[in-house]
Amino acid sequence: MKFSQSRLAVAALLLPILYLLISSLPSFLFFLLVSAAILRAQYEFYRFYFRQNTPLVYLGLCLGFLLLCWLYFNPPLSFAVLAISMLLALLIFQLFFFQQIQNALLDSAVLFIGIFYLAGFLGHCIAIRQQPEGIGFIFFLLFVIWGGDAGAYYVGRTIGGMKLYPIVSPNKTVSGAIGGLLISVAGGVLARWLFIAESFPFAWSEVVLLALILGGVGQLGDLVESLFKRSAGVKDSSGLVPAHGGLLDKLDGVAFAAPVLYYYLVFVVG
C-alpha cells in the first residue's frame, strides 16, 4: 500500500510539471528536452549490458543524438543512408577500439539496438510534435500509454488471476492487461476532448480504435523491456524516478507506440 501511495504521490508531483513543459516549450526547446530524456533512457538500456561507461557507450549515445537531430531537422538524407552510415561508423570504431575481442560481436549488436530501439522509436515523439495538433497528440500518446500502465498495475494488483507471460514478467496478469486496455481507451477519449481541437478530423470511433491499438502495442513494449531486464538480471532500469524506476521503465511503452501514432497521422489522417 505504501508503495502504491508513493507511486501516486510522485506522479501527482511530476505530471503537472511535465504538462507545463510540453504545452509551453517552443519546438526547439521541446526537441532538447525530449532528446535529453531519450538519451538518458538509451544510457539506462546500455547499462543492462555495459556495467561500466566505455567509449562504446558514448559512441552509441552520440549516434542516437545524431538520429534525433535527423528526425527534428529533416535533412535531405534518406533514413537508409543514415542507418547504413551509423552502422559503418560503429563497426569501424569497434574494429580499432574494442574492449575484449571475444565480446566484439555482442557489444556491436547491443549498441546498434540501443540506437534504433530508443532514439529511433522514441524520436518519433519529436516528429509527432511537428504534425498538426502535435502537442495534443503528444498528450494523447502519454494519456493512452501511461494511463494503460497505471490501469494494468492497479487492476492487476486488485484482481490478480492468471499470469500474462510469467517467464518474461512474473507479476503481470491477464486481468491487468485487459484493465490497462480499458484505461488506455478512457485516457485517449479524455485526451481527445481536452487537447485536440474539435475541428480536427479525428472521429470518436477512431479515438477508441487507435487508443486500443496503441495500448496493446505499448503493453508489448513493456514486455520487451521486461525481457531485456530479465536477460540482464535487473529489476528496474534505474532508480531515477522514485517508486517508478528509471526513465526507460516509463518510456518502454511509449517507444513502441510513438512510431505507430506518427505513421497513423501521416498516412491515415494525412
Image (spheres, rainbow, N blue to C red):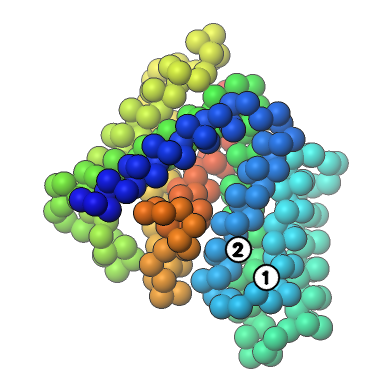
Up the image or down, 233 lies above or below 161; here it is below
Q: Is residue 72 left or right of 44 when viewed as pictured?
A: right
Q: Residue at x 61, y 78 (%)?
A: 52
Which residue occupies 46% across, 36% down?
Answer: 15
Residue depicted at 57% across the width and 42% down the height? 259
* Looking at the image, residue 205 lies above or below residue 86: above
Residue 211 placement (x, y as % from top left)? 40, 32
From the top left corner, tell me how far across and down residue 164 is, in percent.
25, 56
Q: Which residue is disc 2 drawn over?
A: 43
Within-10-Å neighbours for mark 1: few <14, some 14–19, many 20+? many
x, y percentage for residue 6?
A: 32, 48
Q: Which mark is residue 57?
A: 1
Q: Are marks 2 and 1 in contact (CB under 8 Å)?
A: yes
Element under disc 2: helix
* CA–CA distance in space, label 2 to label 1: 7 Å
The quadrant in which the C terminus is found is top right
Q: Considering the numbered disc 1 on the image, is that residue within a helix, a strand or a loop?
A: helix
Res 131 visible: yes
Looking at the rendered structure, the kind of residue marked 1 is Val
Q: Position of residue 199 (x, y in %)?
A: 54, 9
Q: Would residue 184 be found to the left or right of residue 196 on screen?
A: left
Q: Quadrant of residue 169?
A: bottom left
Tell me the quarter of the picture where residue 236 sits: bottom left
Point 21% across, 44% down: residue = 155
Of labels 2 and 1, earlier in sequence is 2
